[in-house]
Image (cartoon, helix red, strand yellow):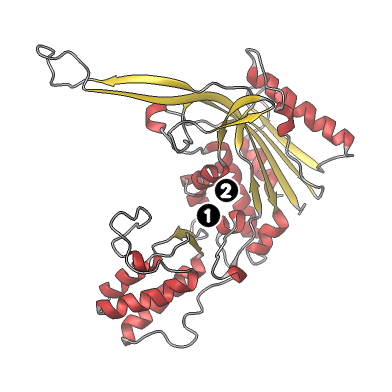
Amino acid sequence: MKRFLQLHLLTSYPPSNVNRDDLGRPKTAVMGGANRLRISSQSLKRAWRTSDVFQQGLDGHLGTRTKQMGVKIFQDLTNAGVKESDAKKWAKDIAGQFGKLKSGKAKADDEEAVSDMPELEIEQLAHFSPEELRLIDELVAALAQRGGAPEEGELELLRKQQSAADIALFGRMLASVPKFNIEAAAQVAHAITVHKVAVENDYFTAVDDLNTGEVDRGAAHIGETEFGAGLFYLYICVDRSLLVENLGGDEALARKALAGLTEAVAKVAPKGKRNSFGSTAHAIYVLAETGDQQPRSLSVSFLKPVYGESVAEHAIGNLETMRANMDSAYDGCADAHRVMNVPAGQGSLREIIEFVQE
């Protein structure tokens, strides 16, 4: 297996706002002196990890990312007949193995509290593997059955070796127990438009269906939302050797993870304002490369914004020319590659997936 897999994708989104900033505007970045639309890597990874494509393809091999594990453990214990005082203490003992718990009662205006028992919440989002979730469930059942506190050694629940494909791909950081951190096998860039973009405003109104207009002919609601449209370039690099290592040497599971990731990145996007804009889209171009050479992004293909009516055609041309020039300058940046070019009717996603699993 060649060490690195690199994916380069072009995806066109119509007017949309799939990833918003703190003001509700589409995220942007300046590149090559021009304003571009941007989709953050965090929102992309979240969309892929929780998508039906990923969930179905890797059923049983995905983790759970939450602050509320202590609350769930408390509920499971009380449902099993454990008195609340014991359930709360034991839930703290168990959840505390995965991170520092919030200290004391949260104030009424504490926006970070996600339950009515904030003292059982972990301060940092913790990613639990299927193995760790199983051990927690087994310990909860044992505690409920015997009606006693956890014994020595029973709280050693964290596992370095695990089978969660999302943790293996995107990593895990546990600030309180760093020896159980897992380095991400996948590097995901922020998606960025290949051309300059101006964020636009949509002024809209809503009409009251029962208002006959005899007294008031005005709108029942007036609002404004911002949007942008563009062709986005996305780059992903996966260290396939590290992926196999993160999955305990299970190469078959690593291939399934690569297949699930590749299908998700081509088909799935963040859901922001999807109902308002119908912004679902599939990649129109995918370049997959494998090799042991040092990886490199091809974002430099779009340092100069693409102009003209045939933006997709020009973008694909720029990308393929830059790849060839890079190969020439550096004596080859990959050993093999496959292309899916929808506008040219070349290749298929199935062929790309087969290639990344080789």
User: Could you tell me residue 313's position as x and y percent?
Assistant: 67, 19
Q: Quadrant of residue 350?
A: top right
Above or below: residue 89 compared with residue 345: below
| In this rendering, position of residue 4 left or right of residue 156 | right
User: Which residue sits at x=47%, y=80%?
Assistant: 155
In the rendered image, which quarter contains the N terminus? Answer: bottom right
User: Could you tell me residue 48's position as x and y percent?
Assistant: 52, 45
User: Which residue sits at x=46%, y=25%?
Assistant: 227
Residue 161 visible here = no
Marks 1 and 2, Cα distance to the nearest angstrom? Answer: 7 Å
Foreground residue among 46 and 262: 46
Q: Which residue is mark 1?
A: 58
- Earlier along the polypeptide chain: callout 1 or callout 2? 1
Residue 76 visible here = yes
Element assignment for label 2: helix
Q: Residue furthest left?
A: 214
Callout 2 environment at 10 Å: few (<14), some (14 to 19), or many (20+)?
A: many
User: Could you tell me residue 53's position as x and y percent?
Assistant: 50, 45
Q: Quadrant of residue 215?
A: top left
Residues at discs 1 and 2 in contact (Cβ within 8 Å): yes
Element assignment for label 1: loop
Callout 1 environment at 10 Å: few (<14), some (14 to 19), or many (20+)?
A: many
Foreground residue among 331 and 300: 300
Name the residue type under label 1: Leu
User: Which residue sits at x=47%, y=45%?
Assistant: 51
| In this rendering, position of residue 213 left or right of residue 310 | left
Name the residue type under label 2: Gly
Q: Which residue is mark 2?
A: 260
How many labels were placed on the picture?
A: 2
